Image (cartoon, grey):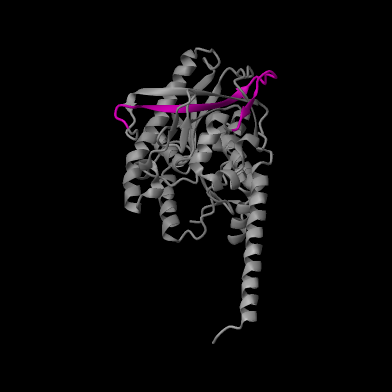
């Protein structure tokens, strides 16, 4: 049946109006996202009484070749970030969330949509630490905590957690590793991107398992190297800042995601570890079979139905380690939390996007609430097992945060 000329004209007009409305809607959405991208934001304030300082180092491991480097013979290298209790000098410049030299390379790596519309501009994100002040004279020495982000994430993605720990009297040492981290920008201007071979998104499930077995020893080895270097810094810091100020007998480690797996394996491999925390990380490596002896906190996101095959395997492996821990063990999950509730990314990603996901998931934990839970559990756990504070402090947190629950068994 032929359509009349008038009816055809009405259809064309309707499609035109619809297309105009869709285009207008997209334009409004992009405008809102762009405005949010450029809006100033301050990270949650640390809860301890110390002011916070931050400094960085470039350390090369001359004893290890980097197997992920595109050229042979390249030595492993790490860019280290250290947050610490500071003397609170008014002359010290505020620390940048992410140094400006990193902005353009990271934006280029992430792509325009993610970096300019779905993520806050790092130049408008404000932190509470200052750059390179002296260490606080309040204590003779401070416990040391190693921090490992997950997968390709950057160490600065965990600034809220690092600053909070430093404000409670811990020296927090995180690091980014070339060819493994998303990118590393060195002080001399070198920009090193993640190796395609290290991008698990490009691998099949079987290849991922083989790759993890290959790369986990690298990550754990990097952590051991960093601890060795921190020990040397404590013995003979050329600047004098950290000399004899780091208590290497009270060494902890925590990590998120693959960083959590690294924390577990590091404590399995290195007796210098006194306590550790796994933030939503699936255990991997020989630690699953062998277990641990150090106090350990497992703080997980809400994995929903734990009878599903994937979360069930994760929980089973976690319980295998947990059940053999002699003391100081906690296996908890945070109701409504997702995988990024433990890092600054829960605040830096577009809140329009985050709230939409929460709506689709029929609920979700507020970003700042999730970070507060994480920071309080982290510094309290280390207070108990690195400083000898009463274990009842951890029980008190369960009353403050009803979202935190024991894994059903």
Residue 274 in the image, given as x and y percentages of width and height: 47, 31
Q: Nearer the viewer, residue 211 or 293?
A: 211
Q: How many marks?
A: 0
Residue furthest left as drawn: 72
Q: Nearer the viewer, residue 377 or 87?
A: 87
Q: Residue at x 43, y 28 (%)?
A: 78
Dividing the picture into quadrants, the one containing residue 375 is top right
Q: Nearer the viewer, residue 154 or 366?
A: 154
Q: Residue at x 57, y 30 (%)?
A: 100
Above or below for 172 versus 314: above
Above or below for 79 versus 400: above
Q: Is residue 395 visible?
A: no
Residue 322 in the image, given as x and y percentages of width and height: 44, 45
Task: Locate the N terminus by quadrant.
Answer: bottom right
Q: Is residue 19 visible?
A: yes
Residue 405 in the image, given as x and y percentages of width and height: 57, 51
Residue furthest bottom as drawn: 1
* Magenta segment boundaries in residue numbering: 71-97
Q: Is residue 286 magenta?
A: no
Residue 43 in the image, given as x and y percentages of width and height: 65, 37
Above or below for 45 versus 333: above
């Amino acid at each position: 049946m032929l359509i009349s000329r008038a009816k055809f004209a009405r259809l064309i007009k309707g499609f035109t109006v619809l297309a105009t409305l869709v285009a207008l809607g997209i334009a409004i959405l992009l405008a809102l996202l762009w405005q949010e991208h450029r809006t100033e934001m301050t990270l949650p304030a640390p809860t301890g009484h110390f002011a916070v300082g931050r400094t960085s180092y470039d350390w090369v491991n001359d004893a290890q070749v980097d197997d992920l480097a595109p050229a042979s013979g390249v030595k492993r290298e790490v860019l280290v970030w250290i947050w610490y209790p500071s003397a609170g000098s008014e002359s010290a410049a505020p620390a940048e969330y992410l140094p400006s030299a990193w902005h353009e390379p990271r934006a280029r790596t992430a792509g325009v949509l993610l970096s300019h519309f779905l993520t806050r501009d790092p130049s408008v994100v404000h932190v509470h630490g200052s750059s390179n002040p002296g260490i606080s004279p309040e204590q003779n020495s401070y416990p040391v905590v190693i921090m490992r982000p997950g997968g390709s994430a950057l160490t600065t993605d965990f600034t809220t957690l690092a600053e909070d720990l430093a404000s409670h009297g811990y020296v927090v040492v995180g690091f980014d590793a070339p060819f493994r981290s998303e990118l590393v920008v060195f002080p001399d201007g070198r920009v090193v991107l993640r190796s395609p071979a290290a991008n698990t998104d490009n691998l099949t499930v079987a290849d991922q398992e083989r790759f993890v077995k290959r790369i986990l020893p690298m990550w754990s080895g990097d952590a051991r190297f960093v601890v060795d270097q921190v020990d040397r810094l404590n013995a003979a810091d050329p600047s004098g800042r950290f000399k004899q100020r780091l208590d290497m007998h009270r060494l902890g480690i925590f990590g998120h995601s693959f960083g959590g797996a690294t924390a577990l394996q590091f404590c399995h491999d290195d007796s210098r570890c006194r306590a550790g925390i796994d933030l939503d990380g699936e255990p991997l490596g020989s630690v699953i079979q062998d277990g641990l002896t150090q106090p350990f906190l497992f703080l997980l996101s809400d994995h929903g139905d734990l009878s599903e095959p994937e979360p069930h395997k994760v929980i089973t492996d976690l319980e295998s380690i947990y059940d053999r821990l002699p003391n100081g063990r906690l296996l908890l999950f945070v109701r409504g939390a997702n995988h990024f509730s433990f890092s600054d990314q829960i605040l830096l990603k577009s809140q329009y996007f985050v709230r939409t996901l929460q709506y689709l998931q029929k609920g979700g934990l507020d970003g700042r609430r999730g970070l507060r839970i994480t920071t309080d559990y982290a510094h309290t756990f280390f207070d108990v097992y690195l400083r000898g504070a009463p274990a009842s402090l951890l029980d008190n947190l369960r009353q403050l945060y009803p979202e935190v629950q024991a894994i059903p068994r």
